[in-house]
Image (spheres, helix red, strand yellow):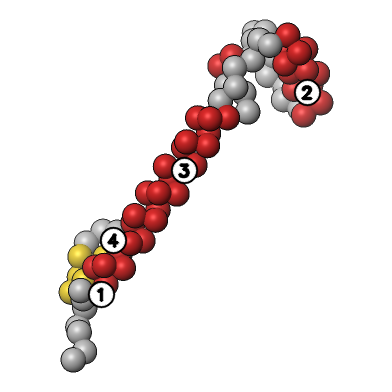
Amino acid sequence: MVAPSSIPRRSGDRVKTDRRDAMMLAPLARSGDLTAVRDLVRAREDAVRECRNARHRLKALLLRNGIAYAGKRVQQVARTP
């Protein structure tokens, strides 16, 4: 993974193809001019996963207590004895 802002571009070079990107990135990678952002991407994925897991745990807790939350407002659920 490479930071898009670290890739030098010529003005007017708007056409994007995998082949052209590969031909442009290969020499930059060999010379070490690209900045890796792999750790940042992994940290973001971990944060998104943790947020989703926390949301699921919270919704399960609310549902166990008879409260249904669909993301907009809280509704009381009729509890069976």
Relative to the observer, which residue lies in front, 80 or 16? 80
Instruction: Please tell me which of labels 2 and 3 falls first in the chain.
Output: 2
Give how far apart the Cα atoms at labels 1 and 3 are. Answer: 27 Å
**Residue 29 on image: x %, y %:** 72, 16
Name which residue type carries label 2. Answer: Ala
Q: Answer yes or no: do the residues labelled 4 and 1 have beta carbons within 8 Å?
A: no
Give how far apart the Cα atoms at labels 4 and 1 are. Answer: 10 Å
Crowd class of label 4 (few under 14; some 14 to 19; many from 20; radius 10 Å): few
- Marker count (numbered): 4
Q: Quadrant of the C terminus?
A: bottom left
Give how far apart the Cα atoms at labels 2 and 3 are. Answer: 29 Å
Q: Mark 4 sits on what residue?
A: 58
Q: Nearer the viewer, mark 2 or mark 1?
A: 1
Q: Is residue 68 visible?
A: no
Q: Is residue 29 left or right of residue 76?
A: right
Q: Mark 1 sits on what residue?
A: 64
Q: Is residue 31 visible?
A: yes
**Residue 77 on image: x %, y %:** 21, 78
Q: Is residue 39 left or right of residue 25?
A: left
Instruction: Please tell me which of labels 4 and 2 falls first in the chain.
Output: 2
Relative to the observer, which residue lies in front, 55 or 4? 55
Q: Nearer the viewer, mark 2 or mark 3?
A: 3
Name which residue type carries label 4. Answer: Leu
Q: Quadrant of the N terminus?
A: top right
Q: Mark 2 sits on what residue?
A: 22
Q: Residue furthest bottom?
A: 81
Q: Is residue 76 left or right of residue 10?
A: left
Q: Answer yes or no: do the residues labelled 2 and 3 have beta carbons within 8 Å?
A: no
